[in-house]
Image: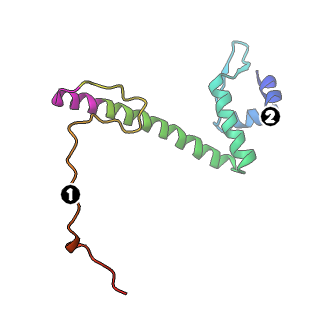
Amino acid sequence: MISAVAEQYQIHPQTLRLYEREGLLAPSRSEGNTRLYTDDDLERLEVILKLTRELGVNLAGVEIILNMREKMSAMQTQIEDFIATLNQELAIHAKAPIQDTRQSLIPVIQLTPRPKEPPAPESSRRTRMK
C-alpha cells in the first residue's frame, strides 16, 4: 500500500502519486482502488530515488533513463536469442555439440584453432638509431 511504501522509503505519499502521474510508476490496484506495489515496482522506485537523490537527475531525465534501461534489456534479450540461434546453426553445420549460451557475453563454438604465424626475421625488423 502507498502508506507502507512511503514510510519504508521515507518519502511523502504525494511523491509516489506524482511518480504515478508522470508515468514513472504504475502500481496495480485492488478492487477498493488501493495502490498495490509489486517487487518490480519497488525495484523501479529504488532506481528513481537513487537517480533523484544521489545523482540529482530531474524527473524528465529519470523517464529517459528508465526508457533506455528497458530498451537495453530488450536488446540484450534479442542478442541472446540471436547468439543462441547462431550457435545452433553453427552446431548443425560444424556437427559440434550445442552449448548453453545464456550465461556468456559472446559465446561461440570453437572450431579447430588457427596455427600461429612464426615471428618475423631479425633483418626485417626496424631498429632505432641513436
- Above or below 63: residue 8: above
Quadrant of residue 1 within the rendered picture: top right
On the picture, is 23 further left or further right than 52? left
Q: How is the image coloured?
A: rainbow
- x 41%, y 34%: residue: 104
Residue 106 located left or right of residue 119: right
The quarter holding residue 41 reads top right
Asked whether residue 91 is drawn in magenta, I would say yes
Q: For the stretch drawn in magenta, what is the main secondary structure?
A: helix
Q: Which span is picked out in magenta?
A: 85-96
Figure quadrant of residue 31: top right
Query: At 25% across and 27% down in the image, what residue appears?
Result: 88
Q: Say which element carries label 2.
A: helix
In this view, 7 is above or below 124 = above
Q: Which mark is residue 14?
A: 2
Tell which circle, 2 or 1, labels the residue nearer the N-terminal end.
2
Q: Position of residue 19 (x, y in %)?
A: 70, 37
In three-dimensional space, the C-alpha distance between marks 2 and 1, rounded to whole angstroms, equals 71 Å
User: What residue is disc 1 on?
Assistant: 118
Q: Residues within 10 Å of mark 1 (few under 14, many from 20)?
A: few
Coordinates of residue 53 in the picture (x, y in percent): 75, 45
Give whichever of 62, 117 is nearer the camera.
117
Measuring from the top left, give residue 79's x and y in whole percent. Answer: 37, 37
- Pick the residue in front: 56 or 61: 56
Type of amino acid at the residue the image marks with label 2: Gln
| Residue beneath the point at 69% across and 15% down | 30
**Element type at marker 1?**
loop
Mark 2 against mark 1, which lies toward the viewer?
Answer: 1
